[in-house]
Image (cartoon, grey):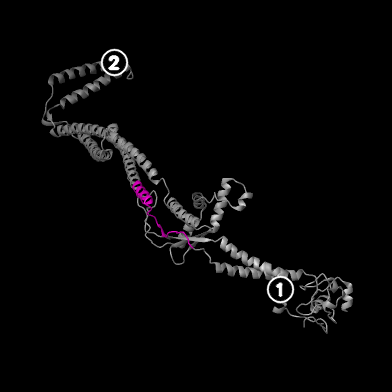
Amino acid sequence: MQGQELVVLGSNRTLSFTLRDFAVMTFRRKRIVVPCFLGILLGTVAFALLWPRYAAETEFLIQRERVDPAVTAQSTNPMMTSNVVSEEELNSEVEIISSDDVLRKVATATGLDKKASIFDVFRSPDPEKRLERAVLRLRGNLTLEPLPKTNVIKVTYVSHSPESAYQVLNSLASVYIDKHKEVHHPAGQFGFFDHQVLEAQKQLQTAEDQLRKFPAQTGTANPTLGRDITLQKLNDFNASLGQSRVSIAENQKRIAALEDLEKTTPARLTTQMRNADDAPVLEQMKATLLNLQLKASDWSSKYQPDYPPLQEVNKEIAETQAAIQAEKQLKDVTTDQNPAYQWVDSELVKAKADLQGDEARAAETEAVIRRTLADAEKLDVQGIEQQDLLRNAKAAEENYLLYLRKREEARITDALNQNRILNVAMVESPHIPMLPAHSLSLFALLGLLLAITVTTGMVFSIEYFDPTFRTPAEIESTLNLPVLAAVPMQFLPFHANGHSNGNGNGNGNGNGNGHRNGHHVADAKPADAETKQTAE
């Protein structure tokens, strides 16, 4: 009951917090609650009215309709035929859009770095820092979202000015497409390949000039063909040398056989034979023998048998007798040349002549083989050099054709880039938003929720930090003592001074009203010993 005593019997009573208790606290703090609640609510609505935020949108389609050749050193380019755009590619495009290079260009093109904020008064006027802060604000107001199950990237930019939102997205689209072209198709390819074409052409001309001068320097138009012909001749010479060596061996064996046959074949043949002696010679020989015998007989009577002249005479006598005996056996023999011996002798001479000829031919053939082999080796070296020149010329030609093809591909790529034929298309162009991004009712609802939350928190905070007692239950729970009686405020002796506890109205003339919801207790603080004693 209001304005009456409240007697609480018992002790250690625990009361639960109810919605009524919250209402009591709210009404008790209404001087703070009402201004706070209305201030937050009206401030939110005023912010929505004075600072509206407009959202401009655009969408980019990532596709693979354009297939570019890969910039490689290979003559054949791997072509990408898949039309499926992966999630990684979409995320890569999102990162390109939100990169610092793109945002800095957009901030510079739209003048965001020139727009001053109230906070810029206390910051450094350095243009680079202003640009960096503009990029941070731009990134904070920019939203990039790959739409699910599509190849579309949705870009939203929120600004207080609809024209600014449109300009930012319009500039962002242009800068992003240029950046996409720069990233996926680096500039300078045509110039690079054009320079390489000129260098390859010079190398090709140099290689062809060396190849043309080679026959005049070596004296051979085709060293490889000349080497093959020389090797064929070398085989013929080797065969001829083999035949010569076989002929030499045959002649050597023939000469040996003929010499053996010549030794056993008589040079002449006996054609007529008759016995006859020479009478005058025989008579003379007999007279000489008689004289020698007489001398020996005479000396033998005078000298000893070992006397040397006597022995010499005896020896002459024996020889004369043998000569006379041989003269008696003398025959008349008639001989003629042996045809077999003549044939053997002629064949032997012929074989020796053939042998010398074969040996001379073999020696000359060996010399020719050595010269031919040296020529073949020289032609082989020249052939290797010519093959090197041919390979260099062929490689230079392939490089020249490759760079020509690459230059044409780069020219086509640059032409496609200039005409903005890319794998990025703007599905939805940005437009100036006419309505704010969020309605006034939504801001009012948010302001209402924010006001209720902040006000409730403020009420609980004030109540938590307030050291006074207002109900017997608070005394019991704090002092752990039973409350025997609760005295209304109008019966308190200091009530005439206009003091009131809680949200009661106090008048200075002593007619203060201590009425409140529920029953009041005289101010009792936990640190007041007198209040504790009275309560007991």
Q: Which residue is drawn at 52% across and 64% down?
A: 437
> Disc 1 or disc 2, which is closer to the eye?
1
Other-residue count near label 1 (Cα within 10 Å), few / some / many at <14 / 14–19 / ≥20: many
Q: Which of marks 1 and 2 is nearer the N terminus?
A: 1
Q: Name the residue under label 2.
A: 299
User: At which x and y percent is residue 328?
Assistant: 15, 25
Q: Which residue is drawn at 39% across and 59% down?
A: 64
User: At which x and y percent is residue 523?
Assistant: 83, 73
Q: Which residue lies furthest to the bottom in this view?
A: 9
Q: Tag on residue 26?
A: 1
Picture quadrant where residue 425 is located: bottom left
Q: Distance between the residues labelled 1 and 2?
A: 203 Å
Residue 109 part of the magenta-drawn span: no
In the rendered image, the quadrant that contains the N terminus is: bottom right
Q: Which residue is drawn at 28% across and 38% down?
A: 223
Picture quadrant where residue 498 is located: bottom right
Other-residue count near label 2 (Cα within 10 Å), few / some / many at <14 / 14–19 / ≥20: some
The span shown in magenta is: 406-434
Amino acid type, label 1: Thr
User: At which x and y percent is residue 292?
Assistant: 23, 17
Q: Residue at x 38, y 58 (%)?
A: 80
Report the front residue among 134 and 454: 454
